[in-house]
Image (cartoon, rainbow, N blue to C red):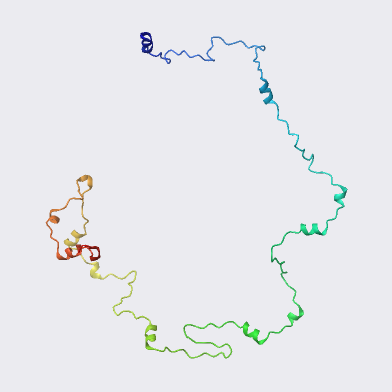
Amino acid sequence: MPARIEQLSRPRPNLLQFPDRRSLYWLDEIPTRSKKTTTAFELTPRLEQLAQSKESSRFIEESRRSPEWMISAAALKACPSERVCSLALPRMPDGWQPERPLLAALSVAVKNAKPSPRICQLAQPKRVKTLLTYCSVDSSTQTISAPITPSSSRILQLASPKQVHAQHSLARPVSWPVPDHVLKAVAGERLQKLARPKTRQALFEGYDPYRVSPAARAATASPRLLELSLPLPRKCKGQ
């Protein structure tokens, strides 16, 4: 037991100070080169078996030797039947019709046809009633009827446009002349004092935003402020 303790109490050797590492490149003498000293490798039967190339299966058929092959005489002299020709045609969708020619030939009967009075009447453009005059146009007589008069005074009142208020003032122009007395006006001391921005210390200079001034502490709310501070009646459930 004391020998084990003594062994563990010894300090570890400093390998950086006295390197004692074995290496393949740290040799006392350079080995001599010889042609006879070669490494001989011996393979096991299993490695020799795995090194053999894989044989093709006996069920695989060889592909054509060339992309061109000879066609038999019977295939050259064969004639397709009507059934084969019908199956060779592409399948058309249901209801498909061939395209009509761009310029269809007109028959003599179509060229010599004369329209009837009904067709001439239907060929006339449709007359649209105007909303401003409330008049109707008859395509046969080409006469304009009299404007329609309202039936009651209430309709006339509602149809009249909205009048502008007497105190209505039009929009001012973008630029307008400034009076001379405004140009020559001089601000007083009170206006100059009110125009100056309010100075306030920063937070790092000792400013406390939560401090209440003594005047605000001694202030008394007016009846109007007390009235405005009351909640709405719909939110007061206990009253």
- Quarter of the N terminus within the rendering: top left
Q: Residue at x 17, y 61 (%)?
A: 190
Q: Return the residue found at the far top.
A: 3
Tell me where residue 166 appears, x and y as whole percent.
29, 80
Indicate the quadrant containing the C terminus: top left, top right, bottom left or bottom right. Answer: bottom left
Q: Position of residue 208 (x, y in %)?
A: 20, 48
Q: Is residue 24 above or below residue 85?
A: above
In the drawing, does residue 159 fall left or right of residue 28? left
Quadrant position of residue 180:
bottom left
Badge count = 0
**Residue at point 22%, 47% (across, down):** 203
* Quarter of the view holding residue 46: top right
Relative to residue 61, is residue 138 drawn left or right?
left
* Residue at (14% x, 56% y) in the render: 216
Choose between 50 and 73: the one closer to the eye.
50
Q: Residue furthest left?
A: 218
Work out whether 220 lies above or below 171: above
Relative to the observer, which residue lies in front, 21 or 45?
A: 45
Give residue 116's position: percent from left, percent from top. Answer: 68, 86
21 in relation to 200, above or below: above
Residue in the foreground of this view, choosing between 231 and 21: 231
